[in-house]
Image (cartoon, grey):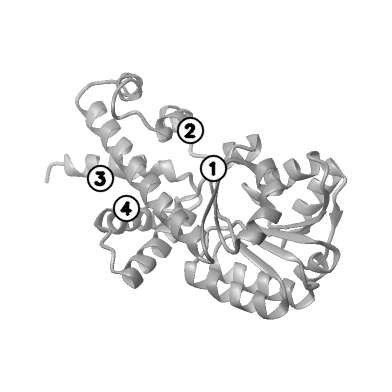
């Protein structure tokens, strides 16, 4: 199978590399050519100059892009040049409504569309251990499964078009609230005189244990917020979740709160930091709360 990969950022580059190492004939495209050139030099992948050229060369195209505007633009261009029977797999975190719209457009052209966002962060992308949640037709899911098995360990066909993005929105709500909870625990502990390492040790050994403690441990304890998942992207993800909540009549007060906290982080110039930097905002607020007039 000839596979195209569009979007070679923090997540996309290691995912594309894993596909190349698994033996797939890979063509890559990225808005900034240097990233495509770097990956091609490392893996032997071909480089395409545009989404349209990528689609013309490939049987399946994977996109991993920042958000809905980029997904719609790239998918629309790719579909215009794709042959009937081509499979377009969007693994970005995007809008359920857009996923359904693109699926309809693909059906008219004979192009299969899957929305297949992922969870697991940059570490999961590098190690090929992502959780992949998929919306779309069963037949298209079966065709794409060998690709998914290279990229991840947990692979779930969530339902029809849009179901993958709804599932990812739910996932991002949980991740955001857990980061918030862990950050609050660390702030409370440290202000009360208990070291963060001790807080971690207790949390990891009891009912409060969670994946965030494992994956974000070095960032939170080492106070190094080089991004895996960026603040700006998680803020966007929660916006998608809240939009879906309004559409379906779901009440998500916790998600709304954390989205506002991410907005405050961005206003402080930390939009490009790892989302675990939410800790720093709570620390800032705690310091201000103890200032004397």
Residue at position x 65%, y 51% in the image: 9
Q: What element carries label 2?
A: helix
Would you say the residues marked 2 and 1 are in contact, meaning their CB atoms lie under 8 Å apart? yes
Task: State the CA–CA distance, disc 2 to disc 3.
Answer: 25 Å
Instruction: Rate crowding at label 2 as few (under 14), some (14 to 19) or many (20 or more) other CA atoms within 10 Å.
Output: some
User: Which residue of the protein is positioned furthest toward the left in this rendering?
Assistant: 293
Would you say the residues marked 4 and 1 are in contact, meaning their CB atoms lie under 8 Å apart? no
The residue mark sitting in front, 4 or 1, is 1
Task: State the CA–CA distance, disc 4 to disc 3.
Answer: 14 Å
Q: What element carries label 3?
A: helix
User: Which residue of the protein is positioned furthest toward the bottom in this rendering?
Assistant: 108
Name the residue that disc number 3 marks: 285
Label 2 vs 1, first from the N-terminus: 1
Label 1 vs 3, first from the N-terminus: 1
Name the residue that disc number 4 marks: 258
Residue 44 x %, y %: 88, 45
Residue at position x 68%, y 45% in the image: 15
**Nearer to me, 45 or 23:** 23
Task: State the CA–CA distance, disc 2 to disc 1.
Answer: 9 Å
Q: Quadrant of residue 284?
A: top left
What number is the disc on residue 215?
2
Name the residue that disc number 1 marks: 121
């Amino acid at each position: 199978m000839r596979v195209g990969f569009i979007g070679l950022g923090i997540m996309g580059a290691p995912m594309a590399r894993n596909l190349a190492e698994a033996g797939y004939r890979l063509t890559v495209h990225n808005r900034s050519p240097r990233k495509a050139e770097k990956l091609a030099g490392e893996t032997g992948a071909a480089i395409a100059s545009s989404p349209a050229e990528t689609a013309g060369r490939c049987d399946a195209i994977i996109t991993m892009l920042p958000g809905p505007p980029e997904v719609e633009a790239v998918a629309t261009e790719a579909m215009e040049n794709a042959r009937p029977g081509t499979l377009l797999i969007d693994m970005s975190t995007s809008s359920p409504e857009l996923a359904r719209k693109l699926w309809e457009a693909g059906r008219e052209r004979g192009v299969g569309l899957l929305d297949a966002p992922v969870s697991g962060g940059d570490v999961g992308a590098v190690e090929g251990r992502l959780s992949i949640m998929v919306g779309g037709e069963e037949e298209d899911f079966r065709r794409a499964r060998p690709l998914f098995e290279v990229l991840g360990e947990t692979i779930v066909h969530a339902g029809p078009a849009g179901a993958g993005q709804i599932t990812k929105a739910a996932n991002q709500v949980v991740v955001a609230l857990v980061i918030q909870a862990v950050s609050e625990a660390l702030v409370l502990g440290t202000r009360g005189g208990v070291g963060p390492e001790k807080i971690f040790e207790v949390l990891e050994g009891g009912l409060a244990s969670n994946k965030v403690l494992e994956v974000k441990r070095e960032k939170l304890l080492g106070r190094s917020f080089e991004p895996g998942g960026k603040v700006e992207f998680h803020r966007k993800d929660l916006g998608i979740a809240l939009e879906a909540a309004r559409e379906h009549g779901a009440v998500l007060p916790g998600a709304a709160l954390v989205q506002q906290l991410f907005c405050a982080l961005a206003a402080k110039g930390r939009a490009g930091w790892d989302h675990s930097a939410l800790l720093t905002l709570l620390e800032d607020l705690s310091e201000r709360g103890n200032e004397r007039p």
